[in-house]
Structures are given as C-alpha cells and as structure tokens.
Image (tube, helix red, strand yellow):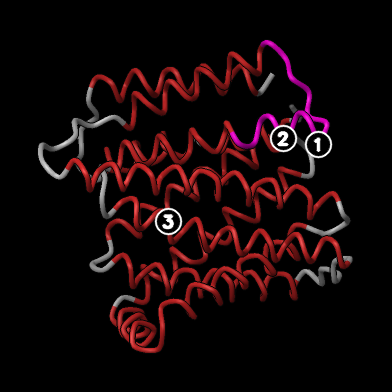
Amino acid sequence: MALTALVLVLTSALLHAGWNALLKRSRQPELAVLGMIAVGAASAVALALALRSPLPPARSALWSVTAGVLEAGYLMTLARALARAPLGAVYTIARGGALLVVWPISIGMLGEAATLARGAGTLLVLSGLAATSWRPSPSGGRHEQRSGLAWAVVCALFIGGYHLTYKLALNEGGTPPAADAISLSTAAAINLAIAGPSKVRLALAELRARPLGIVTGGVLANLSFLLFLFAMTQGGAGVLLTLRNTSILFAQALAFLLGERPARLGILGAVLVFAGAVLLAR
C-alpha cells in the first residue's frame, strides 16, 4: 500500500474517533448528532466550492447520493442498536460485519487483490475489535439486547454499503470533495427530515447551547470522510475499511486521556489490531 494512502486512512480513523468522542460526551447525543451532520454537510459543500471541485458525472453523482442514503441508514440503525444493546457488542458486530460485506464484493466485483497477508490481517483486526470492544452484558433485558444486536447487523450492511458506493462514485469519475459534499448533504437532509420540525428545533437549541463541541464534531466528521475518500483513490475498499477500523484504538487512547483505564482485553485487542494493520499495510 502506498504510504500516502496509509497516512490518509489512519488520519481519517483518528478524526473519526475524535468526532465520536465529542458526540459521546455531549449532553444529548441524539440531538447533537443532528447538528454535527448538518455542520459536516455545510463544511463539505464549502470545502468543495473552495477547492473548485468539478461537478461529477451523472453516474458518480448517483452513487454519491446512494452513499448518503446509506449513511443516513447507518446513523439511524446505530442509534437504535446502542439504545438496546451494549456498546462493545454493537461496535464489534457493526464494524466487523461491514468487513464481511465489503471484502467479497470488493474482491469479486471491484478487482481488489486477495492475498494471504490481507486475509490474516483482516482476521487479526476482527479479533482485536472483538477483544477491545467486549464488555460483559448486564443481566436482564435479553429480548431488548437481541433486538439491539439485530439492529447492529442491519447497521453493518449500511456501513459496508456506503463504503462500496463511495468507491463506485470515485470509479465513475467523481472527485473526493464532490462525493463527500453530495453524500453528507444527502445524509443530513434525510436525517433532519425524519427527525421532524420539533426535534430540529431542539437540535438548534442544543447547537446554540454548545456550539464549540457540535461544530468541531461536524467538521471532524467531514474531514474524516473526505480523507478516507482521498485514500480510496489509491487503494481498495476492503483493505482501507479494515484499516479505518483502527479508529477504535484512537478512541481507546482518547478515553485514557479522559481518565478511563483500559482492561486487559482492551490492551490485547490493541496489539491484535496493530499487528493486523501492519500486515494490511504491506
């Protein structure tokens, strides 16, 4: 893998962890995420205009819109999964399941090479995600938890889908800034429409109350997607999505800085993810 692509995807993972940490620390995440999506879309459009990114061909624009629809579905299903099941289980199923969606299609239809090193690296990353994310499930509410895990499976399909459609948008001649602006704008419009006027007003109130965190989170989210799209111009969707899941390591590091201490499984997971990333970066 080219060094530039590696740096871009790891920086994207760091920014992804950063905006997720800001969202988690917000007083009302369901309202804050609406503001962050809107800010992310606005900053994506502004950046595309500033860079004078050309309008994409029709097929690229269509794939970018499709990516935005899938991103909106990802955000909605993630929220439902997290409301019903533990974070560790949801994260592992959603992110790990997305790899199972992307790799076969990326190899079979998009020409990505399958090697022993990449297979081993992917398995190590999956194992590391499971170890790092695992938390004992609280007793009770088993039906609710099963429902949450089912939503996590659906979420994995959306994650895999929008990564593949991003790659198709770029393959059809779109530029990263244009694909980013179209997809985030589509996702923001869908989520705001589904939220409805009353919830949007509450989200605006939350934005006025905590502008720094929400605006920063939205900008970081935009830059995370944009850098990942630039990385995709130099690599396959499967390997890059796997490497982007190193965001959980950055999230663990941020949690440590905030006073949380990792469990032994978390440390083991970090080692496994690092080893897998080394294999995938070869």
Residue corresponding to mark 1: 110
Q: Earlier in the sequence, mark 3 or mark 1?
A: 3
Chain part drawn in magenta:
101-116
Asked if the magenta segment contains residue 273, the reply would be no
Residue corresponding to mark 3: 77
Residue corresponding to mark 2: 105
Under mark 2, the amino acid is: Ile
Under mark 3, the amino acid is: Thr
Which residue is rendered at x = 43% and y = 20% of the image? Answer: 127
Outermost residue on the top side: it is 116
Say which element carries label 1. Answer: loop
Say which element carries label 2. Answer: helix
Asked if the magenta segment contains residue 110, the reply would be yes
Which residue is rendered at x = 57% and y = 62% of the image? Answer: 222
Determine whether label 1 and label 2 are within 8 Å by CB: yes
Outermost residue on the left side: it is 139
Say which element carries label 3. Answer: helix
Residue 212 lies, in percent from the top left, at 37, 72
Q: Earlier in the sequence, mark 1 or mark 2?
A: 2
Which residue is rendered at x = 23% and y = 32% of the image? Answer: 135
Under mark 1, the amino acid is: Leu
